[in-house]
C-alpha cells in the first residue's frame, strides 16, 4: 500500500530482457535505500514492484517486470526518469490517499500549460475509468496523488483536469510531461468499492 506522495526521483538506467519480461536497474537518490531490504515493495510511476537486489552504497536496485505489467503500464520499459515511493508503514502519515500500486489503465496527456503560479494538466481517460473520476475526487497519475478539478465526459471516455503547484513539478516527473505522453492511472480505492456496492462489479478494465 502507498500514499501517492513521491519520496524520490529515480532513473531507470538499464532495461534488459529478463524472465518473461525485463530486468530493470534503477538509480535512486543517495541514501534512499538505507532502510530497504530484499523483497521490499517500491512503486515506480505508480506501479508496485519488488526489489530483487540492491546496493545501498551506490543507491541502485534491480527488479523484474513481467511482460503483462509492461503491457499494462507506461514508461517502465526503457531508460528514463521515474517517480519512486516506498511502501507505506503502519506509523506513516497518510499525506495523499490510499494507493494500491496497481495501475488501472493508461491515460494520455491532452494539455499541459503554465497558468502563472501553477500548471494545468489535462488527461484523457477511457470510458472504463471515466466512471470512477469525480470533481474533487482523488486520482494517482504516474504514482502521484492528485485532486481532480474538472471532468468532461464524451463518447470515448473523459478528459479530467488537475492543477499542479510548483512543489509537485519540482519533486516529481510530472513537470516533464508533454501532450501525447502516456501516463499510468490508478483510480480511487473507495470509488472502486462504491462501484461494487452499486451492483456493477466490473471494476476498471
Image (cartoon, rainbow, N blue to C red):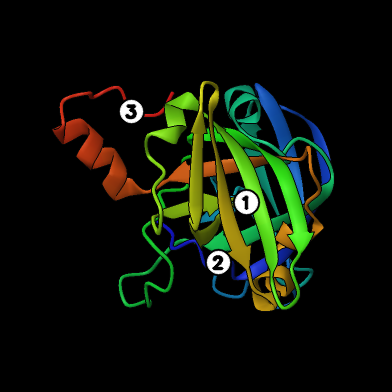
117 relative to 119, above or below:
below
Q: Which mark is residue 44?
A: 1
Q: What is the x, y in percent for residue 94?
A: 37, 72
Q: Which residue is mark 3?
A: 203
Q: Residues within 10 Å of mark 3 (few under 14, many from 20)?
A: some
For disc 2, the marked residue is 36
Q: Earlier in the sequence, mark 1 or mark 2?
A: 2
Sort mark 2 into few (<14), some (14-19) or many (20+) by Cα contacts within 10 Å.
some
Q: Is residue 38 visible?
A: no
Left or right of 42? Residue 171 is: right
Residue 29: which quarter of the image?
Answer: bottom right
Secondary structure under badge 2?
A: loop
Q: As displayed, is residue 64 above or below residue 141?
A: above
Q: CA distance from mark 1 to mark 3?
A: 23 Å
The quadrant of the picture occupied by the C terminus is top left
- Marked residue nearer the N-terminal end (1 or 3): 1
Q: Secondary structure at mark 1?
A: strand
- At horizontal 68% and vertical 25% (from top left) the residue drawn is 21
Which residue lies at the image location 60% right of the left edge and 34% below the top edge? 106
Q: Is residue 8 above or below residue 156?
A: below
Residue 7 as seen in the image, left or right of residue 128: right
Q: Nearer the viewer, mark 1 or mark 2?
A: 1
Are the residues tagged 1 and 2 within 8 Å (C-beta)? no
Q: CA distance from mark 1 to mark 2?
A: 15 Å
Nearer-the-camera pick, 169 or 73: 169
Label at residue 8: none
The Cα–Cα distance between marks 3 and 2, rounded to whole angstroms, is 33 Å
Question: Residue 91 at x, y = what percent?
Answer: 32, 77
The answer to which quarter of the image holds residue 76 is top right
Amino acid at each position: 500500500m502507498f500514499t501517492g506522495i513521491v519520496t524520490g526521483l529515480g532513473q531507470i538506467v538499464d532495461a534488459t530482457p529478463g524472465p518473461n519480461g525485463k530486468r530493470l536497474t534503477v538509480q535512486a537518490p543517495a541514501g534512499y535505500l538505507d532502510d530497504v531490504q530484499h523483497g521490499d515493495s517500491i512503486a515506480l510511476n505508480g506501479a508496485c514492484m519488488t526489489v530483487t537486489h540492491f546496493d545501498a552504497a551506490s543507491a541502485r536496485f534491480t527488479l523484474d517486470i513481467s511482460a503483462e505489467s509492461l503491457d499494462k503500464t507506461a514508461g517502465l520499459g526503457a531508460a528514463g526518469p521515474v517517480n519512486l515511493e516506498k511502501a507505506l508503514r503502519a506509523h506513516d502519515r497518510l499525506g495523499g490517499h490510499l494507493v494500491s500500486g496497481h495501475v488501472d489503465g493508461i491515460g494520455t496527456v491532452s494539455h499541459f500549460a503554465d497558468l502563472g503560479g501553477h500548471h494545468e494538466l489535462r488527461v484523457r481517460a477511457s470510458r472504463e475509468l471515466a466512471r470512477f473520476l469525480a470533481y474533487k475526487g482523488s486520482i494517482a497519475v504516474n504514482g502521484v496523488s492528485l485532486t481532480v478539478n474538472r471532468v468532461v465526459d464524451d463518447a470515448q471516455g473523459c478528459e479530467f483536469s488537475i492543477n499542479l503547484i510548483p512543489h509537485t513539478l519540482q519533486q516529481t516527473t510530472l513537470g516533464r510531461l508533454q501532450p501525447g505522453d502516456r501516463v499510468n492511472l490508478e483510480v480511487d480505492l473507495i470509488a472502486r468499492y462504491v462501484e461494487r456496492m452499486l451492483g456493477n462489479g466490473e471494476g476498471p478494465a
